[in-house]
Amino acid sequence: MTIEEINQKVFEEIGKCKDLKTLEKIRIKYLGRKGELTNILKSLKDLPIEQRKKIGPISNNLKKLIENALDEKRLYLISNHELEPLDLSLPGKKIPHGHLHPFTTLENKIEEIFSALGFEIVESNEIETEYYNFDALNIPANHPARDMWDTFWIKNDFQSKNKERFLLRTHTSPIQVHYMETHQPPFRIVSPGKVYRYESLDASHDIQFHQLECLMVDENITFANFKFIVLSFFQQLFSKKINVQFTPSYFPFVEPGVQINISCPRCNQKGCSLCKNTGWLEIAGAGMVHPNVFKAVGYNPKMWRGFAFGIGLERIAMIKYNIPDIRLFNSADLRFIKQF
């Protein structure tokens, strides 16, 4: 077969080809070890020098054109699966699924527990006014308790009519004030969300973290109701028996205020590095709602009583999943996330 015949037939055959198997046969026919064009290239050494100079460049150029045509046809056939018969015996392709962050899994679990206990999930804005973040929670201006919250104040180019100052909320307690202003007791709510504090970053502190506030208000709420909810929550969360200990503490929006300690879920009070060999972990601040908070939202403190407690969700996750550094939650390291 001459070069002219090859040039006339090969591209026509490639154009009519409808599957990869036939395309491979065409390649072997013309470019294989015993292919038509390969034989011409091999015979060049036996030709006179003048013929070699004439036929050689033409043959090599044709070889490149055939190779390019074969590659383009191969890509076309691969990208157009409908041109090939479907083999139903082949295994399906595995599609990678998304992976929930361990913190998301924990938050979903916590909300599920409280929903089963009859609590409503409530959320609100992360930018708050000074009134809702402090004043309505019995923390007036110049109150020494404000030093407990290192606040990110927002600098505004404008002033509202009543000259309110804005900030990134330092706790989720303002959500409770918003809710009580628009709802009448009895009710029970939990309010998860991000909070912000101007703190130095280390293994246990971050400038952005999550809290969850629990609030229950009714006519005859007592500390016994509070203890039942706390015990039920922590035992379901850690899937084991948990003991609870209350120690006196101070929070401006509750009276009396207590610190909630739970028995160490890792060592069962035998002593370990997590609980510093005490058998107990400080886990939340709590207490009975202060009458001044009820007055701020228009409730009669002589008629209504309630309890509230707040927990840091990152701390819960670090205890539950044995995570040593809070900064890992926002590290974007897939090696960390894929462990859960």
Image (spheres, rainbow, N blue to C red):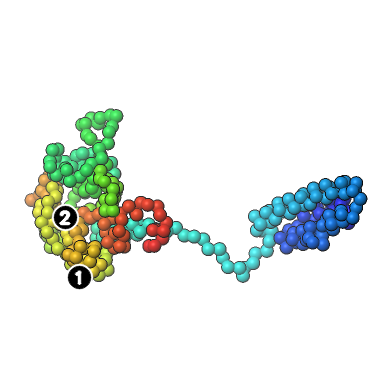
Number of residues whose C-alpha sits closer than 10 Å to that of mark 1, classed few (under 14), some (14–19) or many (20 or more) = few
Give the structural element (helix, strand or loop) at label 2. strand
- The answer to whether one can see residue 17 in this image is yes
**Which quarter of the rendering shows the C terminus?**
bottom left
Location of residue 336 (image quadrant): bottom left
Rendering coords of residue 108 (x, y %)? 33, 59
Query: Which residue does the numbered mark 1 point to in the structure image?
Result: 270
288 with respect to 48 (left or right)? left
- Mark 1: amino acid: Lys
State yes or no: discs 2 and 1 in contact (Cβ < 8 Å): no
**Which quarter of the rendering shows the N terminus?**
bottom right
Rendering coords of residue 293 (x, y %)? 14, 46
In this orientation, which residue lies closer to the viewer: 238 or 132? 238
Q: Nearer the viewer, mark 2 or mark 1?
A: 1
- Mark 2: amino acid: Ala
302 with respect to 98 (left or right)? left
Q: Name the residue located 30 percent from the left edge and 62 percent from the top edge.
A: 322
Q: Label for residue 70?
A: none
Number of residues whose C-alpha sits closer than 10 Å to that of mark 2, classed few (under 14), some (14–19) or many (20 or more) = many
Give the structural element (helix, strand or loop) at label 1. loop
Q: Name the residue located 29 percent from the left edge and 44 percent from the top edge.
A: 126
